[in-house]
Every structure is written in C-alpha cells, then in structure tokens.
C-alpha cells in the first residue's frame, strides 16, 4: 500500500556530511534526477579546501544544497527545508541555517559519544529534546546500509561507504522520484567493479524501500515540473558551461582553441572539461605555472588559434605581465578568472567578487582590457562566447569573471543550436594593407580598422607579410620600435579608445521596472544576479517600487549606463566585495551609489537583500 | 652518417619546404630592414650573421620561421631577422614559443634568449620546455652578465664576480647551462662560441634537424660589461690546451696533438690524463646518442670558472617523442574517431549525457 503524497511548490534540501561521505555526489545525483524530471533548480555546493579534513570535525563538513521548484527560481534558496546530517558535525555546522519546522534526517550510528565530543556536544541533540522544534528522523543510516548489504562480498568499510546511496534512495522516495537514472549513472561509473556496483545499487534500493515501509515516514512529497520555454535542456555547472562556450566560440570562428592552464581551485574543472573535448579539436596544455599557461595561450593566438587561459585570483595576479603584453601586442586572448575568497590563498573553495579591480587595473601602465561577467551557471556559456567575440573582433585580451558559486553551482540550460549563434570572424590579413613611401606594398601591422580600431591579425606562415611585434612601444601604423613622446601619447590613447569603443557593439543596459515608476534601482553584476532577482521579486510582493538592472560588461560599460544611473533617486549596488563596482561607477559617472556588501564566502541570501531593498525604498519615501 | 639518415623524425618534418626550382634563398632573405643596435664589438653580431647565413640552407620560406625572444640584449634578435618574430617579456619566451609550436606544426620555431632571461627569471619555463621536448630551437647567448641593465652579475657569473650589485663579489654559485639542460633531460644539448662561425653553423645544422627541443649554449662576449670572459678560448694557442671538441664516435681529447685524453675516474667523473698513461681501451669515446645522459653530464662538469678545460660541441642528441607532436596526435586520434566537427557534432557535445525536452505549451 502506497503512502499519501503531498504537493509542494518548492523545496530546499541540504545534504551534509564529512568530506569523505560523498555528499557532493549525492547532491549531484539528486540534482540530475530533478533536472530530468523537469523541475527548475539551482544548486550550491560548499566544501572544505582540504581533500580530507580531520574526520568528524566542523572543518571537514561538506554540503550540497539544492533548490527545486515547480516554477522559475533564481537561487539555491536561503534556508533548507530538509537537512540530511550524516554526523554530529554536519548537524552542528548547519543547524543555524534551518528554520523552525524544518526536517532533519540524521544518521544515529555516527552520533557516538566520541563524535559528539569532537564538536562539543555534551549531550546527544537527537535525544535531549533540543531539536523539538524540528521534524527529526533519527535512523541508523550506516547500520541499515550494512544490514542491506549483508550478503555482499565486500569489506564492512566498503559497505559503510555506500550509506550516501542509502540516503539518496530515501530522499528520492521522499520526493517521489524514480531511481532509474541514478541506477544508470552508477552502472556507468562502477561498471568495471561489479561488486561495488551491486552494493551501491542495493543501498540505493534499500534507502528507497525504507521510506516506503518505515513508519517513521508517513507521507512523501511531490514537486511538479516547472513550465519552461520549449527546447532541449540539460543540467550544467558554470565551469562546464564556460568550457562549452569557449569551444563553441572557437568552432563558430573556425579557429583552433588552445587552452594553456595551471590547476587552481575553483577553475580546474574548465581545464578538465576542455581536455575532454579533443574530438572537436580542442587543444589543452597543462603548463608548468600560471605564467606559462597564459604564455602558451598568447603564443597560440599569435600563431592564429584562439588562445585561452583559465585561473582564479592568485593566478590572475601571476598572469598580469603577460596580459599587459597582450594589450600592447593587440592579439585576441581570453582570460577566465573564477573568483574565490581573497586576498592571497584566501578561501579557495568559497565564492567572492573581489577581483573586479584587479581585472580592471592590475597591470603596469595604461593597460585597458575588456571585462565580462557571467550571471548564472548556464549563462557562463553566453558570457564565454561573448568574451571570445570581443577578443577576436577587437584583437584584445578579455577577462571573463565568474566565481566559485557559478563554477560549482548548476541549473537547467536550454541547449543552443549552432544556427542560432553568431559567427565569429577572425579575418586574418593575407595581403599588404599599406604602401611604403616608394610605392611598394607592405604590411602595416598597426594600421587599424577605422570602425573597431582593431589592428590586423597577420599570422606566421602568411607569405610576404613577415613582421616583428613586441612589448616595446610601437610606432603607429608601422609597429616598429618607437620611443617618441608624441607617438606614445597617441598609442596609449588609441589602445584606450579601442577598448572604450567596444561599447558600440554591446547591448544597452536593460532595466526591469514593471510599473515604470520606481525611484530605487538595484544594480548588480556577476553571480549576484539570482539573489538580486529573487530579492526584488520578494520586495515587490511587499509593495516596494524598485527597478533592477544587471551589468554583463564591466569594461567598457554599456553606453547608456550613466543615463540609467541618473534616472533613479537612489541606486543600490550589492556586491560580494567591499564596493568595487560602486567605486568604478562613482568615479566614472559621479553618481552617489549606495553600496551593500558582504564577504562571507557565500552568495547573498535573497531575504537579506529584500530587506535592504525595502529599507531603501522606505528611506526614500520618508 | 648523420642521425637523420637512420630514419629519425626530422626537426622540419611538418614544415613546408620551398618547391623545386623556387628562387634560392640567401642571407638577405633573412635580413630585416631594421638597424641593428647592439654595442660595437658585441658577440651578438657574429651570432646574428651566422644564423642569417645558415637559415637559407633549410629550404624553408622566411614566413614559416618564427623567432620568439624574452628581454635582454640578445632578445632584440628577432627584430633583425626577416621572419615572423615576437620580442616578448622577461623569461617567458619558451612558454610563448610552446604555444606557437603546439598550435602550428608547419612552423620552424626558434627562441633567442640570454643567461639572465633563460636561467634566472625564466628558469622554470626553460627546464619544462626541455623536459617536454617541445619542437623549439633555443639559442642561449651566455655572456655571464646582465648587459641591458648595465652590468649586474648573472646566474652564470662565477662566484666572486664584482659588479655594481655585488661590489664585494657575488656569493652564489653559477649554473652550468649544459649541466642544467642535461639534468632536465633535454634531447639535444650543445655548446658553441660566437666567434667560431664554422662550428656554430655545424651545431645549428644538427639542431635544426633535431625533432624536439635543441638547447644551444653560445659563449658570447659582452665587450662593455664582461669583456674578454672567453678570451682564453679564443686565442688559438691557449684554446688548444683547454677545449675538448666533442665528435660522435671519436676519442675525447684535448691538446694540439690530442695528447691529453678523457677516461672515467673510477667514480662518476671524468679524469683528463696524458695519453701515455692511459690504457687505450679506457679512453672515452663520445656517444651523444647514448640514452643515459651520465657521460654527457660528466663531460659538462669538466669546466671550471678559470676555463682550464671545457667541452664544446654536441653533448647529447637522442630521439624522443616531441611534446607538441604528442598533443597533436591525441587531438587527431580523437577527431578521426569522432568524425567531422560540424554543427551536429558540436550540438551533441553540448548536450552531454542527460537531456530532457520541453514541448511547446
């Protein structure tokens, strides 16, 4: 007899356990099942920098939060409705985020005196009544798993390791999901280890059946599919979408993609993804260091490929000098910075937006580059494509800013067709473009396109156009070494004008102001898009009149940015830094923007931003 | 017999050659219109001239040659050669050139660098280029001094070198570029001299034919900040008693009458002893193709700051897979297995494993 089903419009689930408990995999699998089912979703993995932090400690807690809904959602959710706590540390680390009435599923086997002591619990919170305002399901996940695998020919330790699949099975039952897609996944993952595969499948089933039969669970829930635009979808993380965007842009430009990269958290998955794309001609070089990574990319661009390097903040600092070389060589180059908490090593696995000023100014001399930021995991595809478009069209380095939240977070992605994407036109120079004073034809490597101010991209192997370029200041037009004052003045201004001129090719800043009478504008950039959008929706429900806009292009800004800023009485800029965009806006437009900042290594909560918005509108109407 | 005759891959295998009957190239074909701006008497002039005279011999059109350099006097080299060229930033030329080589098998890629550029600020890139065996020909101009910054000691300056930055003498020990290259398991390592056009050209010829990284240390005189550093090797008489000319298959000897010979010391080093005292069977014969670089390394350890002895020539020349060839082979294999890269292939790639379709509502 089947148990009753209750409909929910959304739910936020957080899986939390030791960093060796397989919580990321469990979350990933639940996400895939929800995606294929048709929910809208957003995810937030949160894990320690250490691969195996001390077992059972708060430091070692790894969690994966996902938000699924039957309607369009923007964030992984502020507060979990369900916490799966695999040990006392996981409970203690996450309890503060749980609203009263939330469900807690805890593995009693791990709540030993020793483990409780490790995190400072004097008494067992599952037994002392301190969790009375939550729905607690305390069950022996580990022993139930071991029991279910009694006949399996593997060690006890291996049996215990399958407990995450038991938990996943239980949650799949709880939210009325079939187990077959996870079964397929396990089969492909463990196909070569039949006994491990059998154990994981059995644990998954046992968890599912436990929900069905145990009296502990009276109802299960259903979150219906969300209406979405027609199309074919997949779930994608920001790092994967970035890799796809880069490869697709290269394809649309008929260029070979060459990635030079050095492993760094949280950017390495872009390297991994691209390294697995050899079948479409992608070339990857794992370089000896960050500097060599960008050196390889620049050398490849010089040779006529689309050179890309991927990194995080500390790596960008090392690449700085080569970015400057690319600025003066005026070659296409894409630098992806997956931002993380800084300064220095900072918080390698946590998110932040504090590299904007490094991207903008972190070089010697007047050294402008284009800067783009992605706003959601799936949007990393479009942002990466746009970065390549600008790099190729304008012969300039472009810094693409994503961050740890986008990199590891995921959401449904409507797959683009190749036909709907624009072409990239490398337009290599193959003929002389200038004449010497004596009338003979020649290549003038710094003779610019009159519209874009881009210089010719003339690649080695082109007969008769041999020329030399370098980091020393070059003469206008001819590109020869030149130290003259007036020439330097001209070249510095030309390089700046070229980058400023990119504004002509980008879409104007779009403002979302349904009633058209808002006096407060919330302006964001990068990964704050989701939390801001959700917060604005919340604030509007409370009657706040508020407009919203989001910047994809940080340098140059869209041409209408100043005009937009000036048409609101108050502009609030939320950022995960100490006000870097606010500084740029104030400097450029002399608009007194209000900064709202947080640097906790986590994305904003939309409820927190909604309060900020409501307060801003109230303050204005005083 | 050269090594290429026995079927080893050639350094220019994938680089197009001039067609039969094409107008022959000459030194002028590789001379740019730029005024050469090294100090009068600089050893760099001789190096430039030797390279410009040698390049036509390759039968490769100037547009298929790329010279990448870093920073320093020697790194002005690309401006003067009428090929494609990049004067990049300090120490990074091997990394940038690796990008060129990986992207374009049809180019002959050369790196011009100095002792400061290659061995100090760019040391990491140099050793990794050699470790990987990228198709690069690296010309390392070694004058044992920083010239462009006006005379500070370099990582090849002997201990005790007095300069403006080391007024009481440098404290640190120098690198031996050949030892370093052999330690990095470079597949082609040679030493030659700016003033010895004939030997230099022979080394260039072998380097160009080598598939993979060729590291050529060129002893180069800086007439301004370190004049005469190699004078004892340039004076015919004093050179005879100091230079061991390495020839494949030949005895390793020194002296006008080859009267001093190299023998294993019994330990891991090499002793130089009078021929009369040497058992003929134990006299070392040079074997640059030996898989084990130990003998080549021992030969590289014969020199000392006083240059009482120094080996010159090709220390090592072995065949090994080149990095860029391997990278290309993996991409090519994946591509030919997967079929053409078209819209459908790209869309399939983006779709990955699990997809779902939402219909028109």
Image: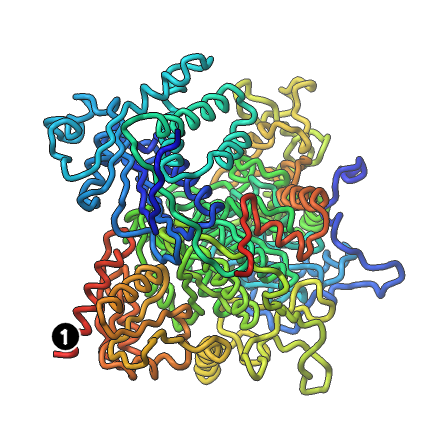
- Residue B114, percent across and down? 52, 54
Among all residues in the image, which is located at the extreme front? A1
Q: How many marks?
A: 1
What is the quadrant of residue B317 in the picture?
top right
Can residue A52 be seen from the camera position used here?
A: yes
Q: Residues within 10 Å of mark 1 (few under 14, many from 20)?
A: few
Among all residues in the image, which is located at the extreme right? B21
Q: Reply above or below: B131 against B281.
A: below
Residue placed most toward the observer, A574 or A88: A88
- Residue A6, percent across and down? 33, 43
- Residue A35, percent across and down? 46, 47
In this figure, which residue is indicated by the disc labeled 1? A619
Residue displayed at 85% across by 59% down:
B19
The quadrant in which the C terminus of chain A is found is bottom left
Residue placed most toward the observer, A572 or B301: A572
Residue displayed at 46% across by 85% down:
A486
Left or right: residue A43 compared with residue B23: left
- Residue A29, percent across and down? 44, 38
Colour scheme employed for the rendering of this structure: rainbow
Residue displayed at 31% across by 59% down:
A531
The quadrant in which the N terminus of chain A is found is top left
Residue placed most toward the observer, A382 or B60: A382
Tell me the subunit letter for badge 1: A
What is the quadrant of residue A356 in the picture?
bottom left
Mark 1 element type? helix
Left or right: residue A186 compared with residue A534: right
Left or right: residue B258 compared with residue B273: right
């Amino acid at each position: 007899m089947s148990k009753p089903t209750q409909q929910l419009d959304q739910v936020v689930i957080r899986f939390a356990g030791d960093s060796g408990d397989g919580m990321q995999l469990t979350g990933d699998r639940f996400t895939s099942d929800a995606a294929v089912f048709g929910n809208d979703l957003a995810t937030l993995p949160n894990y320690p920098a250490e691969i195996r932090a001390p077992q059972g400690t708060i430091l070692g807690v790894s969690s994966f939060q996902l938000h699924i809904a039957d309607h369009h959602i923007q964030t992984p959710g502020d507060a979990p409705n369900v916490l799966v706590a695999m040990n006392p540390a996981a409970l203690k680390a996450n309890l503060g985020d749980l609203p009263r009435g939330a469900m807690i599923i805890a593995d009693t086997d791990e709540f030993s005196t020793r483990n409780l002591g490790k995190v400072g619990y004097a008494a067992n919170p599952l037994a002392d009544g301190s969790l009375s305002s939550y729905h607690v399901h305390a069950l022996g996940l580990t022993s139930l798993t071991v029991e279910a695998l009694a006949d399996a020919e593997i060690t006890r330790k291996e049996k215990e390791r399958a407990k995450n699949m038991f938990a996943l099975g239980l949650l799949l039952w709880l939210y009325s999901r079939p187990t077959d897609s996870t079964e397929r996944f396990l089969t492909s993952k463990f196909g070569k280890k039949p006994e491990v595969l059998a154990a994981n499948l059995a644990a998954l089933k046992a968890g599912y059946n436990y929900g069905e039969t145990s009296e502990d669970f009276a109802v299960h829930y259903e979150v219906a599919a969300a209406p979405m635009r027609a199309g074919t979808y997949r779930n994608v993380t920001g790092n994967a979408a970035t890799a796809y965007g880069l490869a697709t842009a290269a394809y649309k430009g008929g260029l070979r993609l060459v990635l030079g990269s050095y492993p760094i958290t949280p950017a390495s998955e872009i390297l991994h993804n691209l390294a697995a794309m050899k079948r479409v001609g992608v070339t990857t070089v794992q370089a000896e260091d960050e500097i060599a990574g960008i050196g390889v990319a620049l050398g490849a661009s010089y040779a006529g490929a689309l050179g890309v390097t991927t990194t995080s903040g500390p790596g960008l600092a090392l690449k700085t000098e080569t970015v400057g070389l690319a600025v003066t060589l005026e070659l296409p180059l894409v630098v992806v910075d997956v931002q993380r908490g800084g300064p220095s090593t900072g918080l390698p696995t946590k998110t932040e937006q504090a590299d904007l000023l490094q991207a903008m100014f972190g070089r010697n001399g007047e050294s402008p580059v284009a800067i783009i930021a992605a706003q959601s995991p799936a949007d990393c595809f479009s942002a990466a494509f746009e970065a390549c478009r600008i790099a190729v069209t304008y012969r300039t380095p472009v810094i693409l800013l994503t961050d740890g939240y986008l990199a590891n977070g995921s959401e449904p992605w409507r797959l683009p067709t190749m036909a709907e994407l624009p072409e990239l036109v490398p337009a290599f120079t193959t003929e002389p473009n200038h004449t010497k004073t004596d009338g003979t034809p020649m290549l003038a490597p710094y003779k610019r396109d009159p519209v874009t101010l881009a210089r010719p991209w003339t690649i080695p192997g082109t007969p008769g156009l041999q020329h030399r370029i370098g980091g020393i200041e070059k003469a206008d037009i001819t590109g020869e070494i030149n130290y003259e004052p007036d020439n330097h003045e001209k070249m510095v201004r030309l390089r700046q004008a070229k980058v400023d001129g990119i504004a002509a090719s980008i879409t104007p800043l779009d403002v979302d102001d349904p009633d058209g009478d808002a006096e407060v504008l919330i302006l964001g950039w990068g990964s704050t898009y989701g939390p801001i959008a959700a917060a604005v929706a919340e604030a509007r429900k409370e009657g706040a009149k508020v407009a919203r806009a989001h910047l994809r292009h940080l340098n140059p800004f869209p041409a209408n940015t100043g005009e937009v800023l000036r048409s609101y009485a108050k502009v609030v800029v939320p950022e995960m830094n100490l006000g870097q965009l606010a500084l740029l806006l104030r400097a450029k437009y002399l608009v007194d923007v209000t900064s709202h900042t947080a640097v906790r290594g986590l994305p904003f909560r939309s409820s927190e931003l909604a309060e900020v918005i409501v307060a801003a509108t109230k303050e204005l109407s005083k | 017999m050269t090594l290429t005759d026995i079927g080893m891959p050639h350094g220019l295998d994938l680089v197009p050659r001039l067609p039969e009957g094409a107008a022959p190239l000459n030194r002028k074909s590789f001379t740019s219109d730029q005024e050469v701006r090294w100090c009068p008497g600089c050893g760099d002039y001789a190096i430039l001239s030797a390279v410009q005279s040698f390049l036509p011999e390759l039968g490769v059109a100037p547009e298929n040659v790329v010279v990448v350099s870093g920073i320093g006097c020697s790194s002005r080299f690309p401006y003067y050669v009428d090929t494609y060229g990049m004067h990049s930033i300090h120490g990074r030329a091997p990394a940038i050139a690796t990008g060129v080589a990986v992207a374009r098998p049809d180019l002959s890629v050369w790196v011009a660098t100095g002792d400061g550029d290659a061995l100090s600020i760019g040391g990491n890139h140099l050793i990794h280029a050699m470790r990987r065996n990228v198709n690069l020909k690296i010309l390392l101009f070694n004058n044992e001094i920083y010239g462009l910054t006006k005379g500070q000691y370099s990582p090849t300056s002997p201990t005790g070198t007095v300069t403006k930055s080391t007024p009481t003498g440098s404290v640190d020990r120098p690198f031996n570029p050949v030892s370093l290259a052999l330690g990095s398991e470079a597949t082609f390592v040679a030493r030659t001299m700016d003033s010895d056009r004939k030997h230099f050209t022979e080394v260039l010829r072998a380097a160009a034919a080598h598939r993979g990284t060729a590291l050529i240390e060129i002893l180069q005189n800086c007439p301004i900040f370190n004049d005469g550093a190699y004078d004892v090797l340039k004076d015919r008489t004093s050179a005879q008693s100091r230079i061991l000319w390495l020839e494949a298959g030949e005895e390793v000897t020194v002296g006008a009458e080859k009267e001093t010979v190299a023998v294993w010391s019994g330990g891991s080093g090499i002793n130089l002893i009078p021929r009369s005292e040497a058992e003929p069977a134990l006299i070392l014969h040079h074997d640059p193709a030996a898989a084990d670089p130990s003998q080549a390394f021992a030969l590289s350890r014969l020199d000392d700051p006083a240059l009482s002895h120094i080996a010159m020539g090709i220390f090592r020349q072995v065949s090994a897979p080149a990095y860029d060839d391997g990278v290309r082979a993996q991409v090519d294999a994946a591509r030919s297995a997967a079929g053409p890269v078209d819209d459908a292939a790209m869309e399939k790639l983006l779709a990955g494993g699990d997809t779902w379709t939402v219909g028109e509502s």
